Image: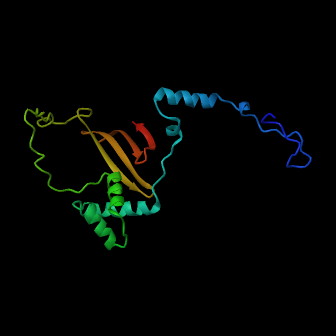
Amino acid sequence: MPWNAVSSTSMTPGVTSARRPSHRARDDSAVTAIRQQCRLTGVSRWGWYYEPEPETPKNLRLMRLIDEQYTRTPFYGVRRMVWWLDEQGYPVNPKRVRRLMRLMGLEAIYPKPRLSLPAPGHKIYPYLLRDLTINRPDQAWCSDITYIRLRGGFIYLVAVMDWFSRYVLAWGSISLTGTRHSAFRR
């Protein structure tokens, strides 16, 4: 018996010619276009549809606490941050704190082993703006990147400015999950 035929012992009384909808009836051009785009860009179909889970409210609360404490004591590493959170009434695993600190880009400030010494044969580049007087627009630009804490998480903000006029030439923002909030704007 074909797959779309109805048996004589139908479960619904009085229904004798019910058929399953044909899958070939839908428009496959959109699916083909997505398939083609994924193949051309080297992205898997799963990656095309995947949307990462947002952080839980508890993790966002922990991230806020960690950020506030890190602002006060940037020399706290994972172990001291776990101790401090436990003192505040948030008993957490060090692995969770390590993951959240890494996600926010936080690292304890401590003396590193002789990292300021140049390697042998390393070329030292001159600071080109040392004796330059900035006295007109478009003479020198600067850029900066920072992260901003929001109620629902964090975003990175990038800005390009003119040194003389302090005019913002371009800016853009992107969230930690990779969702672009705005295009690079002028």
Residue 106: x and y in percent read 29, 54
User: 11 or 156: which is nearer to us?
Assistant: 11
Residue 94: x and y in percent read 32, 62
The C terminus - image quarter: top left
User: Coloring scheme of the render?
Assistant: rainbow
Q: Quadrant of residue 73?
A: bottom left
**Residue at the right extreme, as displayed:** 14
The N terminus - image quarter: top right
**Does residue 124 sit above or below 78 in this rendering?**
above
Determine the residue positioned at 54% across, 40% down: 49
Determine the residue positioned at 20% across, 36% down: 135
**Residue at the front extreme, as displayed:** 1
**Residue at the left extreme, as displayed:** 120
User: 184 or 121: which is nearer to us?
Assistant: 121
User: 88 or 94: which is nearer to us?
Assistant: 94
**Does residue 129 sit above or below 88 in this rendering?**
above
Residue 3: x and y in percent read 77, 36
**Does residue 46 sit above or below 33 in this rendering?**
below
Residue 36: x and y in percent read 54, 27
Left/right placement of residue 27 relative to residue 45 reads: right
Determine the residue positioned at 30% across, 66% down: 82
Left/right placement of residue 16 relative to residue 98 reads: right
Left/right placement of residue 178 relative to residue 85 reads: right
